[in-house]
Amino acid sequence: MSPFTTLRLLSLFCLTTPLVCQGESHDLKIAAKKGTTVWLLLEEKQEQTIDMGGQQMEMGGTTTRTLQLEVRDVDDKGNFVVAVKIARIHGSMTVPMMGDVEFDSAKKTEGEQEDDMGGMGGFSPGAMTKAMTALAGKSYTAKLDALGKVGSLEGVDELVKAANEGPGGMGAAMGAATEGQLKQYVESAFGMLPDKPVTQGATWDRVEAEKSSRGPMQTKLQLTLAKIDADSFELTATGTVETPAPKADDKPAEEGDDPVREMMKGVKVKNGKVAGSQRVSRQDGFVIESSNVTSMDVDMPGPMGGDMSMSMKMTTTAKRTTAEAAMPKPAPKAAEAEKKDEKKEAGK
């Protein structure tokens, strides 16, 4: 084959696969239009081993949240207004001295009607169920930029307050809601995007303060555009979780301050590691599927004095779904009765 023929074939190949050839740069900003609606399943799986004064306990659980996100507006600078509804929350937790507790906002859960002030100082299965599902059915609005970073939230103050009040203080103890957590739900729906066009294989850094807990944690990530085509792109991420240096303006605790928040200020993170991947639609900028695994060892003051240490592993995933697929299926008998009712209505 002559060099001329080889050159022609190579040129033809590059023309048919422009995203691979020529080191083309890609602008990965969100492309969603006004009216775009996406349903997402966000799943969080936690495993914890706690050592408190030489006594070891194990805790864990899985929580799945069904979100509906609708783009309400897009301005000429590419900023977005997104309405968020937490349609359903369900899962299970294993808690020392309480055992396994299941919860589902879409159906009545066993133990839900128990006396909320019973159990361990108000920590009953019924109270836990209410705390874990407190945000179900609630809505709020987020304003974010073209890279998916949330600038502000609207309609969250009363929502957070009500969720955290919980019977017997259970809501606050379980971390039912923080503003940072609600921001994270929105940002989880989009890719962790670079602030300028990049080529396949390019890397960039991202530093984030922990949004989902009250503890002072900082995540440092290196992201890579691993793959891209006309429909989607894939990002990979590796990094560390650390305790940030104290701020100069940190104030000592005062009477009336949140005791849980003050206790969490003493958190020290060791061996924090994170790795994950995301596949994102190029048609609208919403995540198609993602997975992230974080592990760390934590030392902190114990709630009853002394020191406490924890080994933690958290696995979070997100994937697109539909309203129908996200809701629980009716029991066989109920479904059969529903079909009979439909036939009766059709025969009238």
Image (cartoon, rainbow, N blue to C red):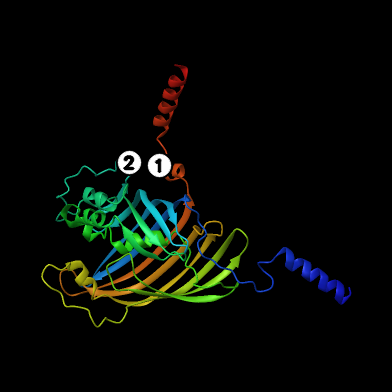
Across and down, in percent, residue 286 comes to 49, 58
Please name the residue shown 51% across and 65% down the image.
29
Is disc 1 placed on a helix, strand or loop?
A: loop
Q: Are marks 2 and 1 in contact (CB under 8 Å)?
A: yes
Residue lying at the far right in this picture: please name it.
Answer: 2
Q: Nearer the viewer, residue 79 or 219?
A: 79
Q: CA distance from mark 2 to mark 1?
A: 8 Å
Q: Quadrant of residue 282?
A: bottom right
Q: Which residue is mark 1?
A: 328
The amino acid marked with disc number 1 is: Pro
Task: Specify whether 81 is left or right of 232.
Answer: left
241, 179: nearer the viewer:
179
The amino acid sitting under disc 2 is Lys
Q: Nearer the viewer, residue 43 or 123?
A: 43
Q: Mark 1: give few (<14), some (14-19) or many (20+) Cα within 10 Å.
A: few
- Answer left or right for 343 relative to 116: right
In the picture, which quadrant includes the N terminus?
bottom right
Q: Dot 2: few (<14), some (14–19), or many (≥20) neighbours within 10 Å?
A: few
Reply above or below: 5 against 189. below
Q: x%, y% of residue 226? A: 57, 69
Q: Earlier in the sequence, mark 2 or mark 1?
A: 2
* Residue in the picture at 43% in, 54% down: 73
Numbered disc 2: secondary structure:
loop
Q: For residue 340, what is the image quadrant?
A: top left
Residue under circle 2?
107
Residue located 28% across and 56% down the image: 156
